[in-house]
Image (cartoon, rainbow, N blue to C red):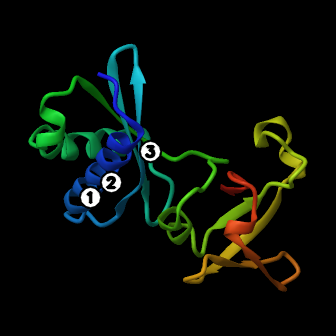
Amino acid sequence: MQLSEHQRKRLCKTVLAVADDTLAQKPVYQAIAVDIEDAFGRLALQVFVERTDRRINLDECAEVSRMLDAPLADLAELQALSYTLDISSPGLFRSLHTERELRFYVGKTVAIKPAGLIEAKESYAGLTRYQLKAVHDDLTLELLQEDGDIKTLGFNALPEGHVLSL
């Protein structure tokens, strides 16, 4: 089934809310983002999950999948759809796109991709690493540099996909 962009966004938001409610039972897990793609007439429902204390592993992704399976199957919006559920880590060098994602990475290492670097996977040498100290309400980022100085950047002023998780 083909979803409109509006339907896809609304369904992502609903699935994220269900994931939040379900994962509250085990607060070490946090849903970071949801994406829905059309995979040959079947929807691929991707839920990106991370641990609050360290990187998530494959067995833990399987556990989260089992936790989310029944609540998502009960979701009215999904009952008429054919879909697969994919639980995974956001991964290294994943572009951060939302305030939710940014707030999760406060206190963790992120990278800023220079404007001239098209794909981070082409060369990791062009990335500048920082500790994300704070995300303000106006989405100004406070970044701790290696020399101890604080750099501030407006997230919305950066090109799309230029803040990466590490």
Amino acid type shown at disc 1:
Ala
Amino acid type shown at disc 3:
Asn
Identify the secondary structure beneath mark 2. helix
Question: Marks 3 and 2, Cα distance to the nearest angstrom?
Answer: 25 Å
Q: Which mark is residue 57?
A: 3
Q: Name the residue at 39% across, 13% down.
A: 40
Kindly indicate the quadrant of the structure image that contains residue 39.
top left
Q: x, y percentage for residue 18?
A: 22, 54
Q: Name the residue at 84% across, 75% down.
A: 146
Query: Mark 2, mark 1: which one is toward the viewer?
Result: 2
Q: Name the residue at 32% across, 54% down.
A: 13
Q: Name the residue at 26% across, 58% down.
A: 17
Q: Are marks 2 and 1 in contact (CB under 8 Å)?
A: yes
Q: Please name whichever residue, 21 or 116, is drawn nearer the observer in this view of the structure.
A: 116
Q: Please name whichever residue, 81 or 45, is drawn nearer the observer in this view of the structure.
A: 81
The residue labelled by disc 2 is 13
Q: Earlier in the sequence, mark 3 or mark 2?
A: 2
Identify the secondary structure beneath mark 3. loop
Q: x, y percentage for residue 44?
A: 36, 28
Question: Marks 2 and 1, Cα distance to the nearest angstrom?
Answer: 6 Å
Query: Mark 3, mark 1: which one is toward the viewer?
Result: 1
Question: Marks 3 and 1, Cα distance to the nearest angstrom?
Answer: 23 Å
The residue labelled by disc 1 is 17
Image quarter where the C terminus lies is bottom right
Note whether 41 is above or below 120 in the view shown. above
